[in-house]
Image (cartoon, grey):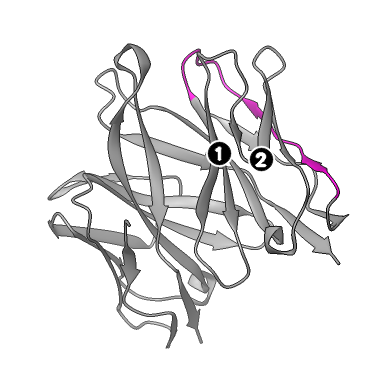
Amino acid sequence: AQTVTQSQPEMSVQEAETVTLSCTYDTSENNYYLFWYKQPPSRQMILVIRQEAYKQQNATENRFSVNFQKAAKSFSLKISDSQLGDTAMYFCAFMKALNSGGSNYKLTFGKGTLLTVNP
Amino acid sequence: DVKVTQSSRYLVKRTGEKVFLECVQDMDHENMFWYRQDPGLGLRLIYFSYDVKMKEKGDIPEGYSVSREKKERFSLILESASTNQTSMYLCASSLKYVGQGGKLFYEQYFGPGTRLTVT
């Protein structure tokens, strides 16, 4: 079974600064996908960024980027120029195919990191 | 935009009651999921469905059942609610996406959640 570990239950950062959230995972799979989801207070969970394990290049989405280290099984999220609206719970998630046909997929989530951006 | 809706934002039920949580998505997604979210535990998968009338157990199916009679609707049923089922319940759906090399992966879209209290 896969496990996802987020070692930082809470973090805080000043507005406009950079912060990195850590995530490690354990799997014997070679092909899989990794995600960071964001859950703002009292709002819906949304996808922030995704990374395919077969890609060596780190994914980026505007101010969000990842540092994907496949051998180390590490997948950290960097938020640059932090904004007040980045305050949220962030979840790291892992996905592999459930069967050889790849017709359905299951997400395994970490326990989350609560990020607070201070003015 | 993909829309996933849940029948209630807040629900209070008594121990032993039968409880129905409804989820509807409007984008013809094949996959639908039910998670529960608890502080310090992250999201845990209860059940998922990859087609009408098809279902598979997730990590914590005990005490729950599901129903998917129509593609757009996925119901979570608590046959006899207990206090340890007090939690936030999140529904999600996903769209098939063909990636590089024929690999398939799914981005999950979440509903707003139902906070269930069992007294």
Q: Position of residue A70 (x, y in %)?
A: 64, 15
Distance from Cα at disc 1 to Cα at disc 2: 7 Å
Tell me: residue A98, above or below residue A92. Answer: above
User: On residue A49, which mark appears?
Assistant: 1
Q: Amino acid at mark 1?
A: Ile
Host chain of mark 2:
A
Q: Residues within 10 Å of mark 1 (few under 14, many from 20)?
A: some
**Residue located at (62% from left, 22% from top):** A58
Q: Which picture quadrant has residue A86?
A: bottom right
Question: Residue A3: x and y, percent?
Answer: 60, 33
Q: Is residue A72 above or below residue A49?
A: above
Q: Between residues B66 and A85, which one lies in front from this camera angle? A: A85
| Residue at image point 63% right, 44% down | A110
Which quadrant of the rendered structure holds the C terminus of chain A?
Answer: bottom right
- In the displayed structure image, the side of residue B119 where residue B93 appears, left or right: left
Residue A93 lies left or right of residue B82; in this view the side is right
Q: Amino acid at mark 2?
A: Phe
Side of A110 where A72 appears, left or right: right
Examine the residues drawn in magenta and state their main secondary structure: loop
Q: Which residues are magenta?
A: A17-32
Q: Chain of mark 1?
A: A
